[in-house]
Image: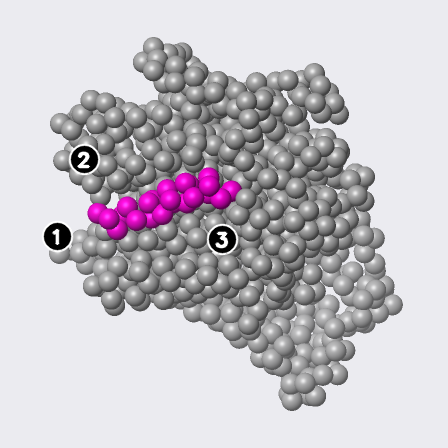
Amino acid sequence: MEFVLLIFLPVVFAILVPFAYRKVKGIHTGWFVLLVPLVLFSYYLSFLPLVMDGGHAISEMKWIPSLGIAFTSYIDGLSLLFTLLITGIGSLVVLYSVFYMDREKEDLGSFYVYLLIFMTAMLGVVQSDNTMTLYLFWELTSISSFLLIGFWYTKDKSRFGALKSMMITVFGGLMMLGAFILLSIMGETFSVRELIAQAPDLLNQPYFTLALVLLLLGAFTKSAQFPFYIWLPDAMEAPTPVSAYLHSATMVKAGIYLVARFTPIFGSASTWIWLVTGIGLLTLFWGSLFAVKQTDLKAILAFSTVSQLGLIMSLLGAGAISYHTTAAMFSFATYAAIFHLINHAAFKGGLFMIAGIIDHETGTRDIRKLGGLMSVMPISFTVAAIGSLSMAGLPPFNGFLSKEMFLESMVALRHFELFNFDTWGIMFPIVAWVASVFTFTYSMYFVLKTFIGQKKFEQLPKQPHEAPIGMLLAPMILATIVIVVFFIPNVVGKWIIKPAVMAVQPTLYASPSAIDIHVKAWHGFGAVGLWLTIGVIVFGTLLYLTIPKWQPLYRIQPDQLSLNNGYDAMMRGSEKGMNRVSRLYMTGKIRTYLLYMFAFMSVTIIALLFIKDAFVVDMNSFAAITLYGSLNAIVLLVSVGFVVFAKSRLAAIIALGGVGYSVALFFVIFKAPDLALTQLVIETVSVALFLLAFKHLPALSTHGETKSNKMVNLMVSLSVGVMVTLVALSSHSQKMIPSISQYYKDTVETEAAGGNIVNVILVDYRGFDTLFEIAVLAIAGIAVLGMIRLRVSRKEQTDENK
């Protein structure tokens, strides 16, 4: 079996979920769903030996071969790392949700369907080698996350958060699509691998920088980089299992994946280094600074996620410098980025689950009402402490190792002289260190304010108690990983990190074993990272102890100047603006809309006729003018004049019938009896229907039209007449393209076994078209019948009341 099909396993299984939810009431639906990520995780583990040796695997399923679009699963070190995170953390999230989501109160059928669709979307993003299918899965993550974030759709905040996340991430997705199209034009391929192979040639292409900026817009919006991070805190209205999944291991990491995957193409550009490193550091600083301002546990974690994503992004930018220098330190930065990505998924997933447990067992996430929970929730406290200390960068936890690597990488930027890093470069380690101090502070703020200190149980909606062991199991596993990785970082590096680094820097290494990086917890007293970490602990502790003194400083910032307020103002303004524009042309009168359509059609077609030099008149091929033809033409023109100038509807209807019958006579004169018969039937039925409904038609009126309105009507009518005349003359005289009628003559018997060309066209050549036309008429008829019945029933109801 082609393993590309496994991408679709979750969404195929999602079809069965509603049946399991309805038919098997005694078992939580999550237990069935848990099989999917577990099976996938076990299967994808088998690729580890392959990628550890520097190999890769490809599986392809054709989709649109004529355009070069296919579902191509490409598994190398980078995509395998993300795949294991998606399925591994996904398994723990589903396990957690079994105990978190009430099977009696929640719509579990919809919840797990959305979750499985999202899982397929994420697997598609990280495994797609074709940029078009990558974009398809990318937008599917936006749609499925919209459904997940807005799962509790009866809450205004849930709907608002879901819409906000989709608006921002879809905007980024469209920008990314622009980048893919430009890359395909420059490289003449949709394959990411082939684009990477052409990287030196693409660098000199005129659209290269534009494609770079558009791609980063897609990555920055998805990974909540400054200033696009504003959707992430509002997305916390989702159920906690969703928050743990989307914001620790999957959706927000998609932007990180995109930057890592396309670094071999864009890493040689100075713009890439400045934007990725600079925006990453700014996001790190901004997120860590405002995390301490928050009072909701999930909001604190949301801003901490923003800051941690900025940290990883800045390391990827610093790692791209390795395309300009042979200094090992910058390859070290890429290694640190991948390492911290894994660490962050582990400790942040556990912390989100603990936040959900606190909310579940106390009834609130407001940190101002919490305190002293350690005595009643000792296991939750232990898990939260492990996750928070790792996030703060303290030993013996995995976050300490990658945080020290981050600080050393930022210090190394001072020595890179290209692009003036020797002057402005000093700002990079300073910003990184200050942000790390605030990271330490918000980590302590999260765990100590919640579990230590004065008990405030009387303020809690519920009497607090420890969560059931089932709900604690998933965060306990993640906390164990946090500790284990600290003691075996090089085992993780050998199996997972080095293959991923090689995928990001494929031209620098022959195999993952050639990456000479050995992670140690202790580098001696001369190590810069050690002293920076000590400084972080000292100043971070001081900041935590003095929070009541300086936290009011956040109030200095006026709400009107916030980015969220700017987003809201933009949305309100665009809504009002579009309403005003709509009211200008949406008059509610059909005649006005017909004017728009006729004017547009006539102007466009007449312009095209002359631009393409397609207007041709060949008088030689015209039929001879006969006496009957001339008389019929006079009748036709007189009838049209009656229709236009008639003072009553009855006269107009009769004159209109005269027009139709005159056209039918032309068919007779030109020896097309079948068309003539059809035309006669249609005209007869039309006139009959008009007369039947005549009683209910309103009287003719001018509808208050002014002279200017009449002039506009006259001009549009003349333009339509000119257009039809020109098209008719050109269609008759233009011989640039062979007439299709000959094709019908040649094939009507051999292909369709028919003798009447018109009938064969309607039934065989345009069979589906005719069928859909009939279907449309049937649907319209049913709608009319429904409206008549509704009107009758309302009338009867009114009579009964009387």
Element class at badge 3: helix
Name the amino acid type tagged 2: Val
For residue 573, above or below residue 59: above
Residue 583: percent from left, percent from top: 47, 35
Element class at badge 2: loop
Residue 643: percent from left, percent from top: 56, 56
Task: Name which quarter of the figure residue 91 lies in.
Answer: bottom left
For residue 490, above or below residue 284: below
Give the residue number, with chain letter if any, for mark 3: 84
| 325 horizontally vs 97: left or right | right
Q: CA distance from mark 1 to mark 2?
A: 64 Å
> Local crowd at mark 1 within 10 Å, few (<14), some, or many (≥20)?
few
Determine contact: label 1, label 2, CB under 8 Å.
no
| 82 horizontally vs 245: left or right | right
Name the amino acid type tagged 3: Leu
Number of the label disc, if any, that sits on residue 592:
none
Q: How is the image coloured?
A: one colour
Residue 486 falls inside the magenta stretch: yes
Q: Which residues are magenta?
A: 468-489
Name the amino acid type tagged 1: Asn
| 206 horizontally vs 750: left or right | right
Q: CA distance from mark 3 to mark 1?
A: 67 Å
Give the total number of marks visible in the rendering: 3
| 491 horizontally vs 662: left or right | left
Give the residue number, with chain letter if any, for mark 2: 376
Task: Name which quarter of the figure residue 465 lies in.
Answer: top left
